[in-house]
Amino acid sequence: MGEHAPATSFSDRFSTSEPLFLPIPGNGADHKQPLEIIRVDRLHNLCHNVDLYHIERCASTMDVAWTLFDRHEFPEWASVLADSQTTGRGQFHRSWVSETGNLFASVRLGNLAQHPAFPTFVPALAVSMALKSLGLDSEFKWPNDILVGRKKIGGILVENRSGVMIAGIGINLTCSPPTEAMRDPRAFPPGHLNDFGLVTAPFELWPLIHETLMQVAQDHSVSGGSPDLVRQLESIMAFKDEPVVFTSPDGRNFPAILSGLTKQGGIRLITADGEATFLTGSFFPVVH
């Protein structure tokens, strides 16, 4: 697999940018830290003439995205790309380690509310397709992880406020946290794209993911289809038809076979009592 060489710097890609100075209401999900003023550069010519905001350092691209939305400056498919985050967040308000050199982005999703599975499934499929176009196979681990070689290289978090949906996408490009830093000993070992021979940079990979994301959303909106989207995701679904231990929303652990996805965005399991579906929860593969 050939290397995808990054450009020398972010500014090399742009002839014009428009600086904004945003008051961000606190750092991270709890908003308990003092108000922070940050510089954001609005770039016009990278993502299909949809605004891309670049920040050197911020608490979370999600916080910046929602602040821009509140200012009526974050239309559908606009996105935020940061060089680093201080309090990035993942599923269940877990922290997301955000080292410089990796990809940290948030994008406002458009025209996805009509299908319940779309907000998470479309970004997951877009990331996988973008990596595939660069020669790297990946898997989707329900509900929101991206795996390469059974290592976690990325994750997706979707926040919904009154029907407005913003997806946060984090991908390890050049480094990843040490395995001992993972909270759950059963968690998948972290990895990064360089581990697998793919050399790229955030401002090279993000436009590709963004373009693929818009195309996937358009294709499935036109076709009407959750079933098609579910079938595509199931084709790259990690541990499909394999034994797993599932943790239900009420904390119960039980063995099951992972059989697929639902058109509502949930998971289908075969248990001792028959087929069961869950919209939330987590699972780990059975280690023999």
Image (cartoon, rainbow, N blue to C red):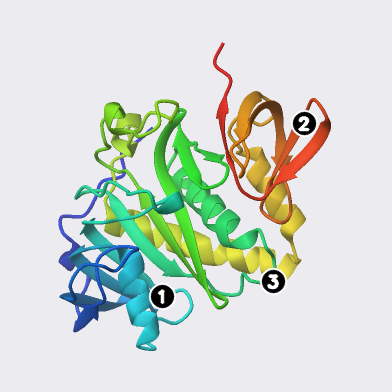
* Label 1 packing within 10 angstroms: few (<14), some (14-19), many (20+): many
Query: Residue lying farthest bottom?
Result: 72
Question: Left or right of 280: which side holds 161?
Answer: left
Q: Total of numbered circles in the picture? A: 3
* Label 2 packing within 10 angstroms: few (<14), some (14-19), many (20+): some
**Amino acid marked by disc 3:** Gln
Viewer-nearest of discs 1 and 3:
3
Determine which residue is flagged by label 3: 114
Determine which residue is flagged by label 2: 270
Marks 1 and 3, how far apart at CA: 20 Å
Q: Quadrant of the C terminus?
A: top right
Which image quarter: residue 285? top right
* Label 3 packing within 10 angstroms: few (<14), some (14-19), many (20+): few
Viewer-nearest of discs 3 and 2:
2
Question: Left or right of 150: which side holds 197?
Answer: left
* Residues marked 1 and 2 touching at CB (< 8 Å): no
Precedes in sequence: disc 3 or disc 2: 3
Q: Residue at x 56, y 46 (%)?
A: 143
* Residues marked 1 and 3 touching at CB (< 8 Å): no
Determine which residue is flagged by label 1: 78
* Residues marked 3 and 2 touching at CB (< 8 Å): no
